[in-house]
Amino acid sequence: MKKDIHPTNYRLVAFKDMSNEEVFITKSCAETKDTIEIEGVEYPLFKMEISSTSHPFYTGKVKLVDTAGRIDKFKNKYAKRAK
């Protein structure tokens, strides 16, 4: 392997999903500013907006969008201009 190509700050980091407060710990070299204490051990904290614990694809909770209502609103709004 080539020398000096790997990150030097590879360590355990706590990732926190801010939408559901879920925290998991894994190795990472992500830049962090905050820390969190879990079971008496302090970890660097990386805050995320969404993760596999809250993403609709992984949770199966898909938001339904009323596309028919949106299309009708569009047609009504621009029907006057088309004439």
Image: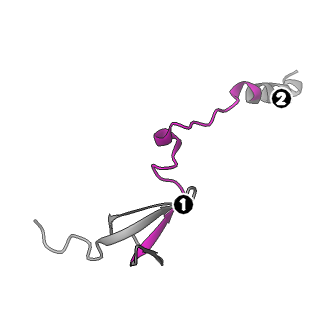
Of 72 and 14, which appears nearest the observer?
Answer: 14
Say which residue label 1 marks: 21
**Above-or-below relation of 21 to 64:** below
Magenta span covers which residues?
Answer: 42-69
Classify mark 1: residues with Cα within 10 Å, few (<14), some (14-19) or many (20+).
few
Q: Nearer the viewer, mark 2 or mark 1?
A: 1
Q: Check the picture and name the quadrant holding the C terminus.
A: top right
Q: CA distance from mark 2 to mark 1?
A: 43 Å
In the image, taking residue 77 as reference, residue 65 lies left or right, namely left
**Dots 2 and 1: beta carbons under 8 Å?**
no
Q: Position of residue 74 (x, y in %)?
A: 78, 29
Mark 2, secondary structure of its residue? helix
Residue located at (12% from left, 68% from top): 2
Residue located at (70% from left, 29% from top): 66
- Which residue type carries mark 2? Tyr
Q: Residue furthest top?
A: 83
